[in-house]
Amino acid sequence: MKKFIYIFLLFPAAKSFAQVPEDAIRFSFYPQNGTARSLATGGVMGSLGGDITANYVNPAGLGFYKTREIVLTPSFSLNNQQATFRDEKTTEKKNSFAFGPIGIVIGQAHRYNPKTSSAFSVAVTQTANFNNRIHYKGLNNYTSFSESLAEEFAKSDYTIDEVLTTLSPLPYTSAIGLQSYLIDTVTIGGQTIVRGASENILDEGQAVGQEMLRTSSGGIYEIALSAAYNDNDKWYVGGGIGIPIVSYRSNTTFSEWDTSANTMNGFKSFTYNDKFSTVGAGANLKLGVIYRPQDYIRFGLAIHTPSFMFLKDEHTASLTTTLETPTGQAETFSASSLQFTNNQEGVSKYLQFTAWRAIISGSYVFREIENVKKQKGFISADIEYVNHRGSRFNSDNEEPTDDEKTYYKALNNVVKDMYKGAFNFRVGGELKFNTIMARLGFGYYSNPYKAVSYKVNKMVLSGGLGYRHKGVFVDLTYAHQITKQADFPYRLEDRLDTFAATKQNLGNVIATVGWKF
C-alpha cells in the first residue's frame, strides 16, 4: 500500500485542504438500511419488491404496488464499541435514535389490464449512522505521534518561519507542533534534523503511553424520488433520483506521556485536540429491473451511480505540550490552529464522487400451502459489488489552481492504492402464518482495504415479526451488526502504521408502521 503523510496538509492553508483517504469509504462502507421487514430478512430487496425500501436498492420493486401506502420507520441503536491497541482492550458505549424509510408509495393498476401497473414513491431514510465513540490506549515502544509531525515538516521543505506565519501551510499539525515545541530542529554530528520531543523516550528503549478518544455524530440522509412500471406482471423496470444530505462531526483527543522514571529526558506529555465536520448534499441515480418468469421466481438487477456531492469541511486543532527542563522542572506550551488560519476555522469546499455499486438478486416465493391457512413465504439473496477504490475528490472551482490539481491527483492515487472493490452478500426469508409473519436474515460486507493485515468487515444477523390485517401492518425487528475496522491515530512513511483493531457490536431495534389505502 502506498504510504502518505497527511497529503491534505501539504498545500497552502488559504484553501485549507482537509480530505483524507478514509473519507472515501465513510460514504460507501455501511450496511443496507430499510424497513423492519426488509432488515429482518437481511436487507434483501434486489428482486423482492413490494416494500418502500426498493427506493434505495432496486426501484423496479415499486412496480409490485397496485395500491397506496404510507410508511414510518423509527429505530434505536445500542452501540458497544471495543478497541484493541498494543494488546490493551477498551470498551465504550453510545446509544442513539435513528430512522429507516419514511414516505409514501402510490401504485395503480391500469384500467384495461389489471396485470399492468405503475407506481411512484417519495421517501427519506437515514442511509448511514455516524454516531459512535471510539476509545483506546496502550504502551507504544515503536512509534510516537510526534514523529509524524516531525516527518511531515522535514519533508515539506518549508522553513520554521514559513510554517509559523498567520496563513501557515501546515496549520493543524506541524505549525502547532513547532509552536508548542513538540517538534523542533536539533543538530547531531553537525547535521540539522527535525525530531519529536517524545522520540527521546523511544531512543532509551522505553515506551510512551498513548490514548485516543473520538466521538462522532451525524449521518447520511437520503431523499428518494422513484417511479416504476409493471408490464403484465412479468417485467418490472424502475428508476429514481437520490438526494443524499451529509452531516458528519467528530471530536478527537490524542494524548501521549512519558512512562519512564527519568525526569531529565526533555518530555513529559502532550494532548492534541481535533475538531472536524463535513456537511453537504448531492445527487445520484438508481436504475433497476426485475424479471418474473414464473409466479414464484424473481430475478433482479440494479445499478447505483456514484453520488455527486458538494461538500464543505471545517477544521480546528490545538496542542498542549509539557516538557522537562534541564533541571527536571515541567514547563507547558500551548498552540491553536486558529493562530495560523487568521483566527478562523479552516474551511475546505470540494466535490466528491462516491463509489458506484451493482446488485444482482434472486428470490423464490413459496406458493399457497393447504391446511395452514394459505401459508406463504420466500427465500431471497442479494450479491452486491461496491467499487470503493473508485471514489474520487475534485476541486469545486471552475478553474482549479495547479496546487489543487496536484493535491487531488495525489489524494485520488492514494485512494486507488489503498482500497479495492468488494462484494457484499445478503440472504433472508419469511414465513407467513395468516396475519403473522416470522423472518430471519444475514448480511456480510467484505473488506474494502487492499491490505490483508486489516481485518475489516461487517456482519448483520437479524430476525423479526410482522402483523398485517385490514390494510394496517406493524413490523418489529432486531438486527445485530458486528463491525471490525482498523483505526489509525497517525501515519508514518518509513515504518508500518500503528493502528487499533476495533470491533463494534451494534444492536438495532427497528419498528415499521404502515397503512394501505
Image: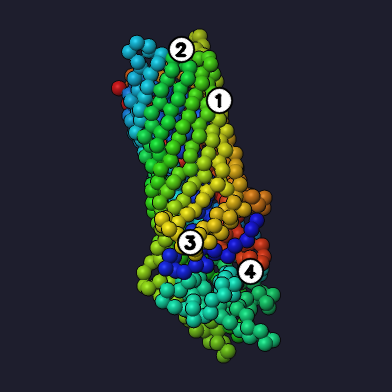
Q: Give the CA separation, mark 2 to mark 4.
A: 67 Å
Q: x, y (%) of residue 5?
A: 58, 65
Q: Which amino acid does the dot numbered 4 rest on?
A: Thr
* Residue in view at x 58 percent, y 35 percent: 425
Q: Nearer the viewer, residue 48 or 508?
A: 48
Left or right of residue 324: residue 191: right
Q: Give the CA separation, mark 4 to mark 3.
A: 31 Å
Q: Secondary structure at mark 3?
A: helix
| Disc 1 target residue | 362
Relative vertical location of residue 74 with respect to residue 343 in this rendering, above or below: above
Relative vertical location of residue 201 with respect to residue 117 in this rendering, above or below: below
* Residue in view at x 46 percent, y 38 percent: 33
- Can see residue 478? no
Q: Considering only order in the chain, which callout, 1 or 4, is on the residue closer to the N terminus?
A: 4
Q: Which amino acid does the dot numbered 3 rest on?
A: Glu
| Disc 3 target residue | 404
> Do the residues bearing badges 4 and 3 touch, measured as CB atoms within 8 Å?
no
| Disc 4 target residue | 143
Q: Give the CA separation, mark 4 to mark 1.
A: 50 Å
Q: x, y (%) of residue 246?
A: 40, 49
